[in-house]
Amino acid sequence: SQKIEQNSEALNIQEGKTATLTCNYTNYSPAYLQWYRQDPGRGPVFLLLIRENEKEKRKERLKVTFDTTLKQSLFHITASQPADSATYLCALAARGGSQGNLIFGKGTKLSVKP
Amino acid sequence: DGGITQSPKYLFRKEGQNVTLSCEQNLNHDAMYWYRQDPGQGLRLIYYSQIVNDFQKGDIAEGYSVSREKKESFPLTVTSAQKNPTAFYLCASSMSPLGLAGGRSYEQYFGPGTRLTVT
């Protein structure tokens, strides 16, 4: 069956460390994968997109990698801050699926302690 | 300000009543989406529309209905047939989803959500 999984429901780290979140998928052939941030009681906000033919994307303190052999994307936040505390969602757009539609993981709740 | 709005933020209804959730965007986006989010679950797609006067069922369309009479508006009606309607509802929009075939792809812009409670 098709699955998209974010391995950790919650991740607790110390301020200043690098947070690494994982997104794995099975039985999909993604054209691209996106990462969103969601704060409690609010809608998700787009952060980064990475295509199937890209290995890595960066934006300020954020880095995303995409390994289609491992069927995995990693999302890194370097020099983490308490303000980075939120739930992070990965979402993929599958080839052969309805155009533009995303399949979302359940999210990983990141807590950065001062 | 450009953006996507949902109203109301909180909505309470009695079981057996239909209720309509509003979603409006002024981003000039062609595509609009409705998701449902439950605790411990990912976002699940209810309905989507890629163009005015056309919409498609998502993964969990049963008990819901939509309309897309204007580009800016995509209201969702939760009918009494929906077995478990209490949830957080999110509306989103994106530019034309020519994405995969055209080699383009667009992020989705989400509204603030409506929390519906049915008792």
Image (tube, coloured by chain):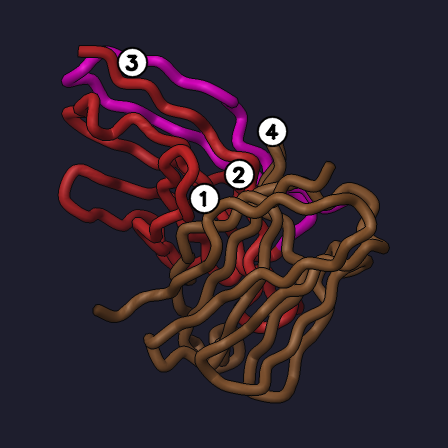
Chain colours: A red, B brown
* Secondary structure, magenta segment, majority class: strand
**Disc marking residue B112:** none
Label 2 to label 4: alpha-carbon separation:
25 Å
* Contact? badges 2 and 4 (CB < 8 Å): no
- Secondary structure under the numbered disc 1 in the rendered image: strand
Does residue B98 lie above or below A53 as drawn?
below
**Which residue is found at the position 25% from the left and 31% from the top?**
A77
- Secondary structure under the numbered disc 2 in the rendered image: loop
Label 2 or label 3, whichever comes before in sequence order: 3
Q: Magenta segment range?
A: A1-28
Local crowd size for mark 3, using a 10 Å CA cut-off: few (<14), some (14–19), many (≥20): some
Discs 2, 3: same chain: yes
Q: In this rendering, which labeled residue sits more in front, label 3 or label 1?
A: 3
Label 2 to label 3: alpha-carbon separation:
25 Å
Q: Nearer the viewer, residue A35 or B1?
A: B1
- Secondary structure under the numbered disc 3 in the rendered image: strand
Which residue in the protein does label 3 denote? A13
Local crowd size for mark 4, using a 10 Å CA cut-off: few (<14), some (14–19), many (≥20): few
Q: Is residue A59 magenta?
A: no
> Residue under mark 1: which chain is it in?
A
Q: Amino acid at mark 3?
A: Ile
Q: Amino acid at mark 1?
A: Asp
Q: Amino acid at mark 4?
A: Gly
Figure disc tally: 4
Which residue in the protein does label 2 denote? A70
**Which residue is found at the position 54% from the left and 60% from the top?**
A93
Which residue in the protein does label 4 denote? B40
Label 4 to label 1: alpha-carbon separation:
26 Å
Q: Nearer the viewer, residue A71 or B118?
A: B118
Which residue in the protein does label 1 denote? A67
Does residue A89 lie above or below B21 as drawn?
above
